[in-house]
Image (cartoon, rainbow, N blue to C red):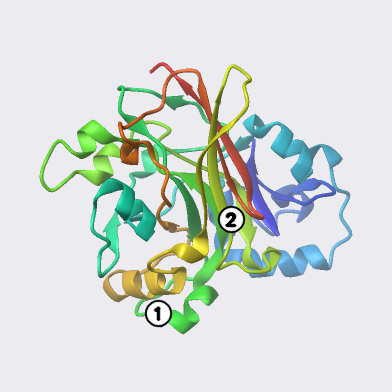
Amino acid sequence: MRLANIDDRAHLVTDRGGVDLATASAGRFGPSVDDVIGHLTDVASWFDGTDLDLNADLSTGALLADLSRLGPPLTCPPQIFAIGVNYASHGDETGIAVPTTPMVFTKFASSLAGPAAKIPIITDTVDWEVELVAVVGTAGRNIAAERAWDHIAGFCIGQDISERALQMATLPPQFSLAKSARNFAPIGPWITSLDELVHPEDLAISCTSSRDGGAPETLQDSRTCHMVFDLPALVAHLSTYVELRVGDLIFTGTPEGVGFGCDPPRYLKVGTTLTSTIEGLGRLSNECVAP
């Protein structure tokens, strides 16, 4: 199942078409994606048992061809967790030691944006970081790693856009503020439930850039199985200290290939289009624009 935000309303989208969830269910489920996320099991049961007239214009293929129709698949998450240096190769390229416990910070919710949102290049040191984002579907504390998947509603793609000069302006670095400017957290294109994925623990993850219609340049290309701390470990660690709540987002870290790790460093420029892809989840396409 795929839950999308179209015109600020929750939609279910499939390869054949999509439906407005509140309208199709005669009000059984609300119109907001934020209200629906905790009820995906009920939504799936209803969807499987209902003969729906799907709108072909809302198929996954049609929406991927025009991502501008989609908003962020969650708009008001209670908490956003982000994990730093969660791929050893990313630690190697940046010279940052891989932590022995998860490095946790937040991205502020006002940075969330849709899969085609334009990224304002507010300085000449704005960087990219493609990430797998997990969405919490069942709340809990002290969740054992072996039960972690039961608490995850699904996945989406995220970009952890970062203003490196601000990030490194102090000691210790100020991760959260530097990663939370307007549209610095595009997510989407929808939330994909785990049953859509054969191996949710091992997905291809990549990021490319292009300019003026030219051929894309690969910036990042890895697999999520290379995380230092996998998703069950992150859920167990986080829930030891805080209550995970329905709708929370977990940005699980980025693989190697970010601009800060290049020699010399390279950063996003106005006119660049950043495309982020994760196997089975779709893609983001974000144009870099003047602020």
Quadrant into which the N terminus falls: bottom right
Chain-order first, disc 2 or disc 1: 1
Question: Amino acid type of disc 2?
Answer: Ala
Q: In this view, does 148 lie above or below 274?
A: below
- Identify the residue under disc 2: 204
Residue at image position (30%, 31%) is 264
Q: Horizontal placement of 255 versus 26: left or right? A: left
Q: Nearer the viewer, residue 72 or 201?
A: 201
Query: What is the total number of numbered labels drawn onto the structure image?
Result: 2
Q: How crowded is mark 1: few (under 14 residues within 10 Å), some or many (20 or more)?
A: many
Residue at image position (75%, 45%) is 60
Which circle marks residue 113 in the picture?
Answer: none
Q: Where is residue 122 in the image (x, y as percent from the top left)?
A: 33, 22
* Residue 290: quarter of image: top left
Taking the view exactly as shown, the residue that stands out farthest to the left is 171
Q: Position of residue 240 (x, y in %)?
A: 30, 76
- Identify the residue under disc 1: 143
Question: Amino acid type of disc 1?
Answer: Ile
Q: Horizontal placement of 118 versus 277: left or right? A: left
Q: Distance between the residues labelled 2 and 1?
A: 27 Å
SS of the residue at dot 1? loop
Residue at image position (40%, 43%) is 160
Taking the view exactly as shown, the residue that stands out farthest to the front is 263
Q: Horizontal placement of 41 versus 254: left or right? A: right
